Amino acid sequence: MVLSLRTEQCHALIDSMSLTYPLYSDPDWKIFDDYCTGAVLFAPKQAWMVIDADGVLRWTWRAGEHGKGRRVPMPLEVLDEARSVLS
């Protein structure tokens, strides 16, 4: 049930924003573990990653990485970062 809901949420985001690129949902936490995002209250912490077509990590934002008060980037801000590092 939880895995299905997470997949449905990703599809809803893709549809609502008319995204033309794939989003990755990580219901088994493999990528969260690989990129050391950490967890709190039995849930992985939020993270944003921009990975290029060759699999090179170009930009990262991890919850808690830059101090407690840092706000979470909004999706459009992350898209701006992606455009900047991938252009």
Image: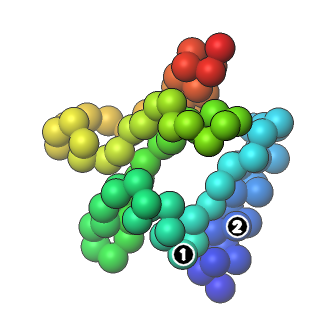
* Residues at marks 2 and 1, CA–CA distance in whole angstroms: 12 Å
Quadrant location of the N terminus?
bottom right
Tell me the quarter of the picture where residue 21 sits. top right
Q: Secondary structure at mark 1?
A: loop
Residue position for label 1: 28
Above or below, 48 against 10 in this view is above
Would residue 16 be found to the left or right of residue 64 on screen?
Answer: right
- The kind of residue on which mark 2 rests is Thr
Tell me the quarter of the picture where residue 51 sits. top right
Task: State the residue at coordinates (62%, 42%).
Answer: 55
Task: State the residue at coordinates (33%, 76%).
Answer: 42
- The kind of residue on which mark 1 rests is Asp
Q: Give the camera-side residue of 74 and 66.
A: 66
- Circle 2 packing at 10 Å, graded few (<14), some (14-19), many (20+), is some
Spot occupied by residue 44 in the image (x, y as percentages of width and height)? 39, 65
Spot occupied by residue 36 in the image (x, y as percentages of width and height)? 34, 57
Spot occupied by residue 13 in the image (x, y as percentages of width and height)? 71, 49
Spot occupied by residue 12 in the image (x, y as percentages of width and height)? 75, 55
Tell me the quarter of the picture where residue 80 sits. top right
Task: State the residue at coordinates (22%, 36%).
Answer: 66
Would residue 87 be found to the left or right of residue 58 on screen?
Answer: right
Q: Secondary structure at mark 2?
A: helix
Q: Which sits earlier in the primary sequence, circle 2 or circle 1?
A: 2
**Residue found farthest to the front:** 54
Residue position for label 2: 7
Quadrant location of the C terminus?
top right
Above or below, 41 against 50 in this view is below
Residue 11 shows up from this direction: yes
**Residue found farthest to the bottom:** 1
Task: State the residue at coordinates (48%, 43%).
Answer: 48
